[in-house]
Image (spheres, rainbow, N blue to C red):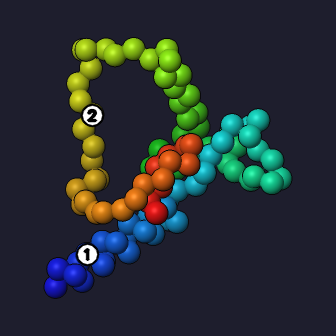
């Protein structure tokens, strides 16, 4: 029974990228060889954002500073754990 649940969870997580994710980029990165969702398509990239036209944040880590007043982030919708290799494609983490 546990294996069926694990397989079901794996299938669910493996389809999340297909159903909800898309690769976004800045206008200067859009080419024929590398199609991606430029600024005019950002409202379509993540439906979880409600279709709002918001820019992905470019964090310059060399200039980032810690603010001790900030509280830890509270994540929702991530109740299930799974084992996987995560790949950083430069925009987001992707399960292998």
The x, y position of residue 78, in whole percent, is 28, 53
- Residue 36, image x and y in percent? 69, 50
Residue 13: tell me if it is visible: yes
Image position, residue 28 (x, y; %): 76, 35
Assess disc 1: are there few (<14), some (14-19) or many (≥20) residues with their C-alpha within 10 Å of its C-alpha.
Answer: few
| Label 2: element kind | loop
- Secondary structure type for disc 1: helix
Residue 55 in the figure: left or right of residue 47: right
Q: Is residue 16 above or below residue 87?
A: below
Instruction: Give the farthest residue toward the right.
Output: 32
Q: Which residue is mark 2?
A: 73
- Residue at point 55%, 35% (across, down): 56
**Image vertical order of residue 13 relative to residue 57, above or below:** below
Q: Is residue 51 visible?
A: no
Q: How far apart are the two marked residues, 1 and 2, measured between alpha carbons?
A: 27 Å
Q: Characterize the local packing of mark 2: few (<14), some (14-19) or many (20 or more) Cα atoms within 10 angstroms.
A: few
Q: Position of residue 54 (x, y in %)?
A: 56, 34
Q: Nearer the viewer, residue 2 or 77?
A: 2
Residue at (38% x, 75% y) in the render: 11
The residue depicted at 83 percent of the width and 53 percent of the height is 32
Q: Is 38 situated left or right of 71 in this image?
A: right
Left or right of 65: which side holds 39? right
Frontmost residue, 47 versus 73: 73
- The residue under the point 16% across, 85% down is 1
The circle drawn on residue 6 is: 1
Does residue 57 lie above or below 86 as drawn?
above
């Amino acid at each position: 029974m546990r294996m069926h649940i694990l397989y079901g969870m794996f299938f669910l997580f493996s389809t999340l990228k297909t159903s909800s994710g898309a690769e976004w980029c800045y206008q200067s990165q859009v080419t024929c060889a590398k199609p991606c969702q430029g600024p005019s398509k950002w409202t379509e990239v993540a439906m979880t954002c409600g279709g709002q036209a918001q820019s992905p944040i470019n964090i310059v880590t060399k200039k980032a500073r810690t603010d001790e007043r900030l509280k830890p982030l509270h994540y929702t919708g991530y109740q299930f754990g799974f084992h996987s290799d995560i790949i950083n494609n430069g925009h987001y983490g992707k399960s292998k």
